[in-house]
Image: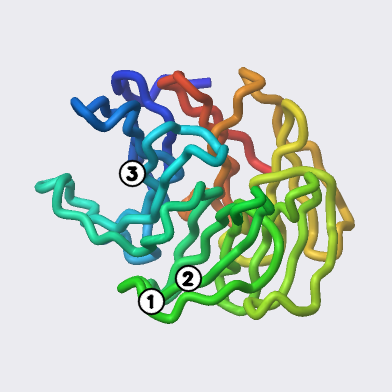
Amino acid sequence: PQRVFRVDDPSELAVDGGRIAAARRVVEPGDACNCNFDPAWSRDGTKIAFVSGQRCCVDEQEQADVYVMDANGYDRHARTRVTTDARPKLGVAWSPDGKQLAFGYTTAGLAPKIAIVNADGTGRHDVGDGRYPSWSPDGTRLAFDDGRNHVVVSNIDGLARLQIATGSRPAWSPDGSRIAYENGAAVFSTRLDGSNTIRVADSLSAFIRELGYEVSGGKNGTVGLFKEQMTRLAAAEP
């Protein structure tokens, strides 16, 4: 492990080719425990999508939506609200061309669903049951947790679903040949058919908050483990 920077009380981190975005809880008078989480860089590095909620939890009282802001951070209050349903959200991911976002949310009965929406908030449609989506580098497939701790790969229309592993929070390698995911307190990497599974790393903490391949990390990428309330980045080559 190597300490790479310090930020006060981060709740989520996201990496993009050497740059790290940190989201943290912000308390605002009259707005309860307002907090931001699940940040995701656009492929071109100019935008950050994230979830902003009031309670930082998944229950019937939570109100959360997906927002987009410029990555330069000059005006952190200048953000675009992409969703308006105020349902609890479970992960957000950019399409490779930066035109759409996939995100998880829960219905009134707390059933997990995955939807795709244009980056301006139009054209929203559900594609199936699940949470924590990750978009393939070629833009044709999604990987996600089906809500029962199974990693599933499907077409972006939700069809041709294939369960490939037991785990959650999947992330594609840059070349699209492997998927990393967390299971318990460890991180694994597997092929798209679920074969050749490799135990990549053990977590420094049981609280793995974000998982992703760093684009600059070699042929199959570098798996990054981001821990809640920690300011260290642990990396291991798959």
Q: Nearer the viewer, residue 138 or 75?
A: 75
Label annotation for residue 99:
1
Residue 159 picture quarter: bottom right
Q: Amino acid at mark 2?
A: Ser
**Upstream in the sequence, badge 1 or badge 3?**
3
* Residue on which the image places disc 3: 19
Q: Amino acid at mark 3?
A: Arg
Left or right relative to 138: residue 51: left
Do callouts 2 and 1 mark residues in contact (Cβ within 8 Å)? yes
Q: CA distance from mark 3 to mark 2?
A: 19 Å
Of all residues, the one furthest to the left in this rendering is: 74
Q: How many C-alpha atoms fall within 10 Å of the one at disc 1: few (<14), some, or many (≥20)?
A: few
Q: Nearer the viewer, residue 132 or 82?
A: 82
Q: Residue at x 61, y 66 (%)?
A: 175
Left or right relative to 179: residue 45: left
Q: In this rendering, is residue 118 above or below 38?
A: below
Of all residues, the one furthest to the right in this rendering is: 195
- The spot of residue 138 in percent (x, y) is 57, 76
Is residue 21 in view?
A: yes
Residue 164 picture quarter: bottom right
Q: CA distance from mark 2 to mark 1?
A: 6 Å
Q: Nearer the viewer, residue 118 or 48?
A: 118
- The spot of residue 182 in percent (x, y) is 71, 39
* Residue on which the image places disc 2: 95
SS at badge 1: loop
Residue 94 picture quarter: bottom left
Q: How many C-alpha atoms fall within 10 Å of the one at disc 3: few (<14), some, or many (≥20)?
A: few
